[in-house]
Structures are given as C-alpha cells and as structure tokens.
Image: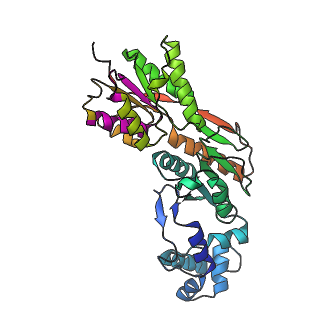
Amino acid sequence: MTLDSTRDAVVGPRVRVGAGAAPQVVPSPSLRGRVTMQQVAAEAGVSISTVSKVINGRYGVSSETVDHVNRVIERLGYEASLVARSLRNRRTNVVGVLVMDFEPFSTEVLKGVADAIHGSGYELIAYSAGGHVEARTGWERRSLSRLMGSLVDGAVLVTPTVTDVQTDGPVVAVDPHTGPSGLPSVAAHNLQGARLGVEHLLELGHTRIAMITGRADLLSAQQREEGYCEALTAAGLPVDRSLMPSGGFEPGLAREAARELLSRPEPPTAIFAANDLSALATLEVAAELGFDVPGRLSVVGFDNIPESALADPPLTTVQQPIRRMGEEAATMVLALIAGEECEGPHRTLDTSVVVRASTAPPPAT
C-alpha cells in the first residue's frame, strides 16, 4: 500500500469544493488511478525535473514549455499530493470543515464556508467523524490530529463538543456546544430567537404553548429553552414544565414528544420546537392524529433549514443565519492563516422569525 493510499484509508472520503463550485466527492486513488508526475512527464515529452519545476513555479523552464506542461496536467487531471505539498511548502492551501455528521445544519454551514473561499485561492475539504454515538465526545481532537498540518492549513469545527484543542493551525468553532471558549467562535443569538418565536405565537392569541426542547447538554438548546420561558413570563403566563418534553434535536424523540403532547385530554394549541427537524416531526405526527395545522395547532421551528419551506404546510420558523455563520467562520480562518488579527473572536449573529403557513390564531372555544 502506498503512502497516498494509506492516507485515504485513514482519512476516508473527502468532499472537495473549488472556488464557486458545489461540493463534490473526490474519489480515492483506489477508485481511480492517481496520475503521477512520471506520467505527466512521459505525456509531455519532458523530464520529471521539468514537470517539478513547472508545478513549483521554479526558474529554468521556457514559457512555451510551461504552457505545454500545464495543458498536459489539466488534460490528465494531475494533482500533487496534499501531504507532499505540505511537506514541501509548509502549506496545503486547503481549509477543512469538520463535522460530527452531515445533516441540514452542517450542510448549510458548508455552503457558507464555500462562499467565503470563493476566489481566495484555497480549496475546501469537508470531513465527517461518521456520526457514531460512541464518538460524540472528543471527535474534534481525533479529526484535527488527522488533518491539521498535513492536509489543511486551518479548520472550521461545526458544533464541537470540546474546544480545548491543541492544533498546528487556526481553528474557528461554529455553534460550540458549551459556548465561547479559547477558540474563536461564531454562533446565533439563540435566546433572542426563541423569544421571538414564542412572542409570535403569543401575538396570535395562543396561551397554551408547549415546547419540544433540545439536547440538555448543549448551550444552544439551553438558551432556546430560556428564551421560551422568558417570553411566557413576560406575557404573564406560567411556565408549565409538563409542557416541555425533550426532543433531543432528534426527529425520532421529537415524534414521541409530539405524540404525547397531542394525545392529552387538553392538548396545547401551539408547539414551539427547539429545531426544525423536531418541528417537521411534529407536523408529521399532527397529520397522523388528524390535527389540522394551523387551524387546530400552530407549529414554530428553529433554524430555517431549506426543508422547512418545503413542508406541508410550510413551516414558520426562527431563522438563524446558518450559511452566514459558515462564511464568517471561514473568513476568520483565512485571516488567521494570513497572520492577521481577528476582530471580535466570538461573534453572535441576530435571529429573526420567518412566518409561513404553519401558524394562525388558536381555534375559537
């Protein structure tokens, strides 16, 4: 097994995003033959040292030969090993996006990072820890140790569980589980967003509003729960903990929570869900149980993932600027790679309510 094939076996599938391009999977060498420098030299009819000079921009090669070799490189699809490039130049010109798993939130962050690197001369590698339950804590350290320095110059960590990581390059966290720490970070104003979402329901006339909460260990979930409680208290309504079952940010758990709420003798007239996946699961359960939305039940989510606009009915939700969060994080990483100081290492972006067809005044009693 070659060094390159060993690296691919360890690192796994990668998503390469060129400037302005959509994410695409780059096959590993085992799936397609990697073009070598020797093949380029043979095809171009020049020496290997000449190809090396062209690739590295060294002197001693005529402009005609440079153009000729570059055309051959483009035609054959030759690409220098990132490991070799980093050893040679101490730079890979690649930014990494590291996620626990690919789901709607992390995918939107990835789009924002791709926006930021457009025209920067950097490429993008997206790396997933695989979503294994046993790897939920500490996956950041393992992933960074595999990629940082040899494959990427800097990285964006999406919803990391830990941020006390030691790295060989700049790292920025998006929506860290425990909030701001030593790493620069970008997050949304979760408490503000939850208050806005519940206030929208209150303005429609709802007074029996339930909440399907998120993961208790995440700061974002805690802040959304706090915003829900603050909105009810400000309206002079009691906070009924029995109306706050956990959905854990997971559709399966959210379905169970929604079914329990809607099966009560006196079900709520509105449900505020801690994320869109939980809200979409609530819509499914409401349809199964014969609850008209929004005639009999109003539902509000949080995130504004693309799927929310495609729901039946389209979901009213709190928009956190997920794509912009990825863009801001990548911009910070690029600045740090360039040796620049980051203004405001911990950035919090505003949220807003996107009103669609899943909310209406409560039914008349």
Residue 356 in sight in this render: no
Q: Is residue 336 left or right of residue 265?
A: right
- Estimate the x, y position of residue 353 in percent, counting from the top left: 44, 27
- Estimate the x, y position of residue 141 in percent, counting from the top left: 67, 55
Q: Residue at x 42, y 25 (%)?
A: 210
Work out which residue is located at the far front of the displayed protein and give it. Answer: 265
Q: Is residue 310 magenta?
A: no
- Estimate the x, y position of residue 105 in percent, counting from the top left: 49, 45
Considering depth in this image, is 68 or 194 the residue closer to the camera?
A: 194
Considering depth in this image, is 282 or 41 the residue closer to the camera?
A: 282
Q: Looking at the picture, does residue 336 appear above or below residue 321?
A: below
User: Which residues fall within the magenta stretch?
Assistant: 262-288
Q: Looking at the picture, does residue 182 appear above or below residue 205?
A: below
Q: Residue at x 40, y 27 (%)?
A: 271
Work out which residue is located at the far top of the displayed protein and give it. Answer: 236
Quadrant placement of the C terminus: top left
* Image-quadrant location for residue 92: bottom right
Q: Is residue 56 left or right of residue 30?
A: right
